[in-house]
Image (tube, rainbow, N blue to C red):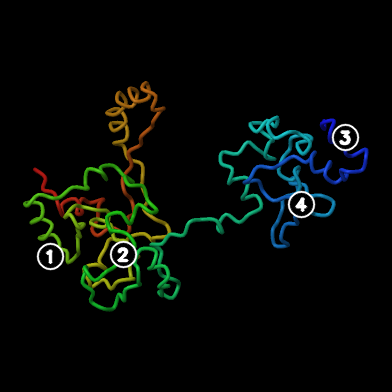
Amino acid sequence: MFGRSYLILFLIGLLPLQLIAEEKKIELPLMHHLVDIKPPEEMKVADYLPLSDEGKIICKTCHGIKDIDKTEIDRVDKKADDFHRGGPYEKLSDFCYLCHDKNDYQRPNIHNLLDEDGKYDEKDCEYCHKEAPDPEKKIKRDELEFRLPPENLCWGCHLDAPHFNALNHRIEPSREMRKRIAASEKKHRIILPLDSENKVMCVTCHSPHEPGVIAEDKPAGRQVADVSVEKGVQYEDHGWNKVFRADKEKRLKKLAAQGGGAHQLKYQRLQDEVLLRLSAKDGTLCLACHEFER
């Protein structure tokens, strides 16, 4: 309903009908999908996502709730299964991909540097490097310029603790361990670089470059790669999982009782690995720094 002043102004001709129509219009949320537009010709819109008679996107294209275009935003049941047609959806993006190509919206894997001809684009190098280095030249480490300190660089895409014991490793090795690291570098002809504070960082163990970017005869180019970067690390189920879960069951229940939510852990073994300076699945990588009693 409009206020009396609006009605009087309209009756005496001082308020155009257009302004009254605009007053009735429901404002859409800022991040709402565009409406009253035609999808591109190359986009295939499913039959159960109806367009207007002019072939344009309208409210009922995406929403199955009756008369949603006439309902105030605050009164719409956004939890209804058919709020998005065909729902409910686990993720909103699953609904978006009914029309949009999922591949066009994926974050690129910047470690996947080489094309089919074994060439790379220097622009990809500059995700991390201020200027793309020439892998054919011998470059000293202090000559490399990064966009962030190397110990922080990986966190632009990855979690700061992407796997068990990641946090525990970011410490300065003891003198004895530094000796073992130096001996391992010499034995395996690799590098195990430390950060500016002589602490272990992600690239101490992980190689950031796809195999072949840096020649394998160079220490920085040597790595374990029995699967492609595109496919990534693969795991397999293992019988030790029962013991692993039983060991942590009591602690996980305590955590859930404290309001942390239910957690389920699963123990798996590495099957295929890539971007590692030495093999982790056979323990060679661990033995590059650590010494275990037999």
Categorize mark 3 by other alpha carbons within 10 Å: few (<14), some (14-19), many (20+).
some
* 4 or 1: mark nearer the eye: 4
Residue linked to disc 2: 146
Q: CA distance from mark 4 to mark 1?
A: 66 Å
Residue linked to disc 3: 7
Position of residue 21 relative to residue 113, above or below, is: above
Query: Could you tell me which residue is drawn at 70 percent across and 40 percent down?
Result: 85
Tag 4 near tag 3, CB within 8 Å: no
Residue 279, x across and y down, in percent: 24, 55
Residue 227, x across and y down, in percent: 36, 59
Q: CA distance from mark 4 to mark 3?
A: 29 Å
Is 119 displayed left or right of 49 in the figure?
A: left
Query: Could you tell me which residue is drawn at 39 percent across and 60 percent down?
Result: 229
Residue linked to disc 4: 36
Indicate which disc, 1 or 2, sits on the residue closer to the N terminus: 2
Residue linked to disc 1: 186
Q: CA distance from mark 1 to mark 3?
A: 88 Å
Query: Could you tell me which residue is drawn at 24 percent across and 71 percent down?
Result: 143
Residue 266, x across and y down, in percent: 35, 36
Indicate which disc, 3 or 2, sits on the residue closer to the N terminus: 3
* Amino acid on which disc 4 is placed: Asp
